[in-house]
Amino acid sequence: MKIHRTLVQAVIETLQQIFIGGVYADKAVEQVLKQNPRWGSRDRRFIAETTYEMVRWWRSLTLTLSKGEGTSASHYYKLFAVWQILKGVELPDWEEFSNIDKEQILKRSEEVKLIRKYRESIPDWLDEIGSKELGEVVWEKELHELNKEAQVVLRVNTLKTTSEKLYQLLIAKDIVVEQFTNTSPLWGEIKRGVLVLLKRQNLQQLDEYKQGLFEIQDASSQLIAPFLQLNEGMTVIDACAGAGGKSLHIAAMMKNTGKIISMDVEERKLTELKRRADRAGASIIQTQVIKENTIHKYKNTADRLLLDVPCSGLGVIRRNPDAKWKLTLDFINQIKQTQQKIISEYSEMLKPGGIVVYATCSILPSENQDQVALFLKEREKEFELISDRKVLPSEGFDGFYMAAIRKK
């Protein structure tokens, strides 16, 4: 593909928004793409994919350039040049690239690869905590997986269609999808309702999406609703619902019977959830903004309680690569306090005999097994662990953890 100056300039502006302006990568890409609606799908894909890949490998690129850190556009052009050289792309004869030494770049790249934290492009502190909690062998393997591009996975909305019907509709529109092919027993309970996108395309403009026939939801995330051991007619509280992807899945699994109370501290997220629920035909979902007395108000009301708690998000870094550069050790330590507070206080909403599922999209035991163990140690007379499950990125999709706990 010929490199066009306007597209490279768009990439540079997006990277500056991310690393200088502190904007999240997805928002920065969205803002830049809106500036020129005349860009075709190929151009838009170049901007988005180049930005995400450069963010993913930012530390490696910076060290390979060996020019220190900078904020100027010229410095970002040089980093772009490094990325293109490492991909084997011939640089155009632009003034911004006049001082680039290709042989020096390739030599320096080989040196960078010798040290893991540089090779895998992560901060020092993250390499230290990952190897400490997971062990060198597992951490090395998972880091490598987390630097791969995330797959786009569709959850078929069984309230409105079937996997087979949706597959035929999408294929007819030249959307390149396939049925779920991973043969691991881990995915057995969801695979019939999953399609995997093989070529990235804008799915949200499709009539099938607007009609609520499917949602975009990673396969690992889709394991959580079945882990609740749902039955039709139950009362389920999704207490950290966000925009409601798991609430929608729960509604479909319960065949739109019973009641789902989707809670969050941010009203704007629940507004988006309502819109998504209407589109999906999930009429059993109610929303509730969490206020001072909310937890006590719903004491002993839930047959099932989902606590998809705030976390470091290390299991989804390939989907949000800028998180590597925005996360701090202080944040992780603080979020672990929040996690314990939520599981301790929110569990009051569960009926005796009911099940709470504690879940994160982290792969760190200190956010997962250790948090559950601490809760059970303090509340062993009231709660017992039924089972737990960790899903690592090397198993094909996002990293997740879930624990099913029964209230005695």
Image: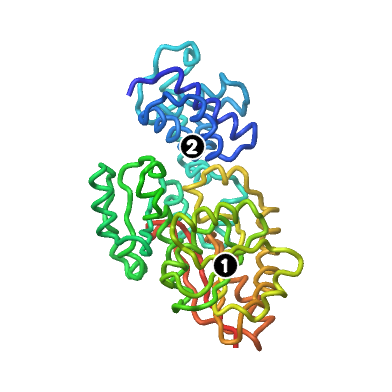
Mark 1 neighbour class, 10 Å CA radius: few under 14, some 14 to 19, many 20 or more:
many
Residue drawn at x 41%, y 27% is 84
Residue at image x 41%, y 12%?
A: 93
Residue 356 as seen in the image, left or right of residue 390: right
Which mark lies nearer to you, 1 or 2? 1
Q: Is residue 9 above or below residue 270?
A: above
Along the horizontal axis of the image, is 164 left or right of 249? left
Q: In the image, what residue type sits under mark 1? A: Asp
Q: Is residue 12 visible?
A: yes
Q: Secondary structure at mark 1?
A: strand
Residue 83 pos. (x, y %): 44, 29
Residue at the (56%, 87%) spot, across then down: 353
| In the foreground, 273 or 191 | 273
Residue 238, disc? 1
Q: Earlier in the sequence, mark 1 or mark 2?
A: 2
Left or right for 336, reference 394: right
The image shows residue 214 at horizontal and vertical percentages of: 38, 55
| Residue 176 picture quarter | top left
Say whether residue 151 is visible: no
For residue 112, the mark is: 2
Residue 349 in picture, x, y percent from top left: 65, 76
Whether residue 229 is situated above or below residue 246 in the rendered picture: below
Q: Nearer the viewer, residue 20 or 173?
A: 173
Crowd tier of the residue under label 2, counting other residues whose Cα lies within 10 Å: few below 14, some 14–19, many 20 or above? some
| Residue 7 % position (x, y) | 45, 23
Quadrant location of the N terminus in the rendered image = top left
How far apart are the two marked residues, 1 and 2, measured between alpha carbons?
45 Å
